[in-house]
Image (cartoon, helix red, strand yellow):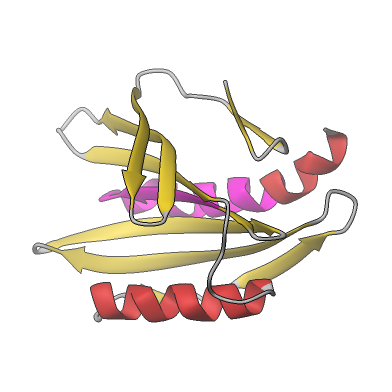
């Protein structure tokens, strides 16, 4: 179990290798999980965290700045329209969306959950070559928003 932002507990799935406490720019990556399927395909879950958002005060402003960065790094990526949620009980906002990109000739599927509480940002990403789990993770991210009410 990993506790993030004092609001979420992330359970590390079985058969995933965990890389802990690395850094990427402004973000800390407290947890990066990777697993391999029977045919060698990789499935990854990345948790990124930052104590200070520099993209604006609202989730919509943050998402716009975040997407601008994604557009520069993956110009051919396709995105679903983000779903925005607000959890007033626990004081956080969430944007959830799916992304398909071609990375080095391989089509990858990614579900993204961006969680913002004040200036703190948490990004949880699922990334795989397998489309089978694409919608599953989106659904799980949406459930995560409301499960925080029980914490």
Vertically, is 49 above or below 81? above
Q: Residue at x 60, y 45 (%)?
A: 140
Vertically, is 49 above or below 79? above
Q: Is residue 137 magenta?
A: yes
Residue 36 shows in this picture: yes
Q: Nearer the viewer, residue 5 or 85?
A: 5
List x then y, in percent, for residue 3.
62, 29
Residue farthest toward the right in the current orientation of the protein: 89
Horizontal arrangement in the rendering, residue 129 relative to residue 16 (left or right): left
Q: Is residue 54 magenta?
A: no
The C terminus, quarter of image: top right
- Magenta-colored span: 122-143
So how many labels did they put on this image?
0
List x then y, in percent, for residue 66.
46, 72
Q: Nearer the viewer, residue 131 or 85?
A: 85
Residue farthest toward the left in the current orientation of the protein: 105
Horizontal arrangement in the rendering, residue 103 relative to residue 69 (left or right): left
Horizontal arrangement in the rendering, residue 146 relative to residue 48 (left or right): right
Q: Residue at x 33, y 37 (%)?
A: 22
List x then y, in percent, for residue 46.
40, 43
Q: Nearer the viewer, residue 52 or 15?
A: 52
Vertically, is 38 above or below 123? above
Residue 74 shows in this picture: no
The N terminus, quarter of image: top right
Vertically, is 133 above or below 37? below
Q: Residue at x 46, y 24 (%)?
A: 13
Q: Residue at x 25, y 73 (%)?
A: 73
List x then y, in percent, for residue 9.
65, 30
């Amino acid at each position: 179990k990993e506790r993030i932002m004092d609001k979420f507990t992330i359970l590390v799935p079985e058969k995933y290798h965990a890389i802990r406490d690395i850094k990427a720019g402004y973000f800390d990556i407290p947890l990066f999980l990777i697993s391999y399927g029977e045919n060698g395909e990789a499935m990854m879950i990345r948790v990124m965290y930052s104590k200070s958002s520099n993209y604006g005060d609202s989730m919509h402003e943050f998402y716009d700045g975040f997407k601008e960065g994604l557009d520069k790094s993956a110009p051919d990526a396709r995105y679903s329209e983000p779903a925005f949620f607000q959890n007033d009980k626990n004081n956080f906002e969430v944007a959830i969306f799916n992304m398909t990109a071609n990375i080095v000739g391989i089509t990858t599927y990614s579900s993204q959950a961006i969680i913002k509480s004040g200036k703190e940002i948490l990004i949880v990403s699922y990334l795989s070559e397998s489309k089978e789990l694409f919608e599953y993770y989106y659904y799980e991210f949406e459930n995560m928003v409301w499960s925080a009410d029980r914490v």
